Amino acid sequence: MFLFAAAAAPLLPDWVVSLVTIAFANGLVVLGLVVLWRAGLVSFGQALYYCIGAYAVALTARWTGFTDAFALVVIGGVAAGLVAVLIGFLLARYREIFFAMLSLALSMILYGVLVKTESLGSTDGFSVATPTFFGYAPHREALGLALYWLTLGVDAIGAVLIGVYFRSVAGALAAPIRDNEIRVEFLGVSVTSIIHTKVVVAGILGGLGGALAALAIGHVDPNMAYWTTSGGFVFVTILAGAGSVAAAFVGSLVFEGVRSFAFDVMPQLWQMTLGSVLLLTILFLPDGLGSVVARLKRRGEAKS
Amino acid sequence: MKRHCGGGAANRGLTPAVPPSNSSGFAVLTASAILTDGLVYAAYLFIVAIGLTLIFGVMKILNVAHGSFYAFGAYGAATAVGIYTNGDWPAAAGFLFMILMGMAVGLVLGIILERGILRLVYGKDEVIIVLVTYAVFLILEDVIVLIWGPQSYAAYQPMVSAGNTEIGELVLSNYDIVLVAIAALLAGLAYWALKFTRYGRLLTTVIFDRETAAAFGVNVTLVYTATFIIGAMLGALGGAVMAPKIAVTLGIGVEVIVLAFAVVAIGGMGSIEGALVGALIVGICRAAAVHLVPQIELFVIYGVMALVLVVRPYGLFVRAQPRKI
Amino acid sequence: MSHRKTLTRWVLAGLAVTAAAVPAQAQQPPAAAPIKLGIVSFLTGPAASPFGIPGRNGAEIVIEALNTGKAPAPFNTVGFGGTKIEAKYVDETGSAANVVTEFRNLVQRDQVDAVVGYISSGSCLAVTPVAEELKVLTVFYDCGTPRIFEEKPRNYVFRVSPHATMDNVAAARYLLAKKKGVTSYSGINQNYAWGQDSWRDFVGAMKVLAPNVTSDKVLFPKLFAGEYGAEVSTLLTSKSQALHTSFFDGDLEGFVYQEQARGLDKRMTIIMTTGEAAIWRLRDKLADGTIIGGRGANGPLARDTEINRWFQKIYTDRYNLPPTYPAYQMAQSLFGLKLAYEKAAKAGAKPTADEIATAFKGIEFDGPAGHVKMAIGDGHQGITETAYGTYRFNKQKKEPEIVDIVRFPAECVNPPAGIDADKWIAEGMKGAKCN
């Protein structure tokens, strides 16, 4: 899928490239949520890592003048990952709604700190310097394409790695953990440490997504840590379903597309349009869009 | 721990009017102000949160659309106030009308949502249901625009006609006192209803263990429907009583959702006492922050929530569920 | 498993998704291609009713008037330079990502010739680098942060409306002129960039103009909090004689109702830097004696000129409410753009963005809110005079009025060219030319 998307890029109009870049950056965060959701956990605070990744990129560029895109994205992921490791110790003990609420509280605390920090522009945020790619400094359409391919590249790597994880023992334990943790403990596995790992994985993915988004949008602000941002990611997760890795990205793309469409067609009633789409999806596609893809795949397999 | 912030000696009403420049007089004044402000804010939080905790406790649904009930209640109240001011009704009758209108709006909305949409998703994963309520919330935000338009409405007449009271150096709005009274009344009613009415006791059993209650022949579906509608009415009531204080405009539902969630998380899902205590803690801490350390006001509610959850992961009043093997 | 079949599925899915993202092709406009403007403001959410909708209405009514050629001179050519204008209205709501995406959609998908809009300073800051990158002429009409032209020189971004520093410096001057006995002041502002910047500028100006006057209670409630009981109590315990607030409509109204019920305005004079937008709704609920600002000489603070009367008439006739300052700001922005366009257009050919930008720099004109000079920010940022007044509700006519108006010349309350607003205030507002 990524190859197709990468190849299609030069043919698509600029605004689609930009929209897809942002959608795919968000898709990484959604992938992190899928990892957690498979274990029965919903985080309402992924915006925390998204924001950390974004600000890490923006601040590095601002304070050190270093603008290499690859390095910045890695820095974003690492920064978010470190925070996830720390927070994970606390968060891994909670389940269900309390996991969600605690993660929300933590992301809102970051939001509050950033709003109070007037030197970073408070709620206005500040711009991210234009990224360079190993010294090459593209402009306009070329920059858009470069960011697009970078995002696709990171997404592809992430998708492959997560796919491997899902097929591994730790990944396969997700469903059992969701269904009945205690029995998994009886198997001699530490559920808390597995969940801790998942929190860290989701955190890193969130940070990478935030870093890419910061480069694509060119601007960071505390709103990236607000609970409605987290809510948006969760929205897409349910839309996409936990079925497959690709679903996260397709779901994100569809969401961005529908939102843009709603803005364009019903500028004063776009919330209703978006809400209706979600509602219809939930009612008629309870396993998310991923299930549509899976069904098509299965039909294809059955025929051949 | 945050529970002991603010507070202090509260000699409200007993101190003569000491000018604030006297430092101990000022301290007492500030302390009394914190207490009264805390109570008023707590009343607001409790009225808003009680519907949410009820719905969660019984149906295990975290209803994001609760913000919409609040907003609809407020808009309904604004319309009611418009009607009675044009008709020149006496203030008390108008106030009652406003409350009834708010609750009526909640009733209608609750019925439509529960029968129309919620019923379709009952068996599903809790997260799915939360998302359904979120989708409904988005849709309802724009329904408000369709019904009432994008402009803001004013419903201040009840608050203004209530006047104010001076206690020493403090000036309190009588409407705020009414709010506290309503919250106390609601708390008392809820407690009495849960303990002494048949429906209340059914509710308690369903909250405690849905399956066993069903096994005993309790009509859980009916309980669900009734609970959701009552929760909706309470949410709308919250909006209706707050309408005279605020500008009734787009987006008021959004702010309220997080506040209500935080209070319910602190107190424990499904616990009315929890919502009460949670509201009081947040209210007083916030008031203290505003008076003493205004910089942290933004964090207070999240900080309290995080702290409470760290110490009591299921909220203050809910015991850890026994783990089912 | 057939890889080709899977690939086919994905290609189809991808195409479907891309098709969904592209809206149905609108009919192509007829022969003489109109000038397309993207107009962006808050159409939903709490900022819609006080700012977004009046801004949008201002655009709609002015564009209509321009398209019929009925505006007063020098704006009486049809549209821009004889070509009609077609406007597309977009909602500003959403995260920075959404705002930037919608901006790109306007420019690259809808192919607008220029974008006029933006209320939130966050949006303006996010859009600026994109506008510069895409080389599209963009006029910000309402956002208040001075940072846009102070951070870097810009080529394609302009702002006709003065930034918010002017509002708070003038507020300080007015307060000190009208309440000579002030010894202490307090502030209640929303806890985000707009509120923080407004307070900082006000305090800075007060320190320069009256160093002995101190600040007492400094309150920053959450944006859209709505409930201010604790804040009102805190202020009631203060000895300040004046209260500064940059609250706007929803929060402002709620605050006014709540403080009125407890008599706060009897203890201190309230200065509302954006109060003008709210007077038509607050009416007799706003206490007499409140100091009102309008982000410029807008609405009742505007001078009685022919163009102002014309603008008030066409707006009020259509929307049943007098225009408030966002509508004025939008009108001024459109007039500025029009003049720049016409200055750049040579012999009927459509000017390029570069040519319009060059023409726009340093332009001067008279609009409904008075005289504008694009004097700072390297010719990209406008300055105008401003005015503050005192509110009075006329009980006989049952109409709001602003009396005791004091006008401050543009160079008195705006920083001069070449110096950042913050620095200018901190260094004593040197070079201010007040009468």
Image: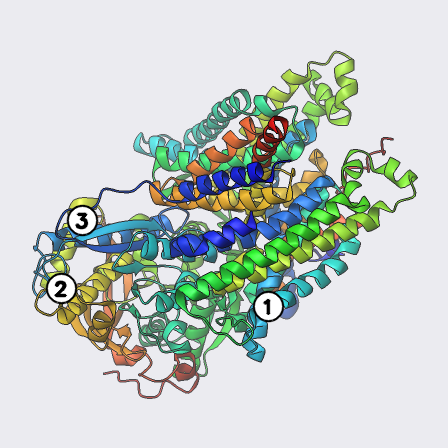
**Residue type indicated by callout 2:** Asp
Question: Which element is circle 1 on?
Answer: helix
Residue drawn 67% across and 65% down? A79
- Residue C335 percent coordinates (x, y): 18, 63
Q: Which residue is mark 1?
A: A70
Q: Which residue is mark 2?
A: C304
Disc number lying in front (2 or 1)? 1
**Is residue C178 visible in this depiction of the protein?**
yes
Disc number lying in front (3 or 2)? 3
| Rendered position, C242 above or below B75 | below
- Residue A272 percent coordinates (x, y): 43, 36
Disc number lying in front (1 or 3)? 1
Q: Looking at the picture, do discs 3 and 2 lie on one chain?
A: yes
Q: Quadrant of residue B324?
A: top right
Label 2, label 1: how far apart the Cα atoms are: 59 Å
Nearest the eye: C111 or A49: C111
For residue C316, the mark is 3
Nearest the eye: A95 or B2: A95
Question: Which element is circle 3 on?
Answer: helix
- Residue B45 percent coordinates (x, y): 60, 43
Residues marked 3 and 2 touching at CB (< 8 Å): no
Label 3: few (<14), some (14–19) or many (≥20) C-alpha neighbours in 10 Å: few
Label 1 marks a residue whose chain is A
**Is residue B287 visible in this depiction of the protein?**
no
**Residue type indicated by callout 1:** Phe
Q: Quadrant of residue A157?
A: bottom right
- Residue B77 percent coordinates (x, y): 43, 34
Residues marked 2 and 1 touching at CB (< 8 Å): no
**Residue type indicated by callout 3:** Thr
Label 3, label 2: how far apart the Cα atoms are: 16 Å
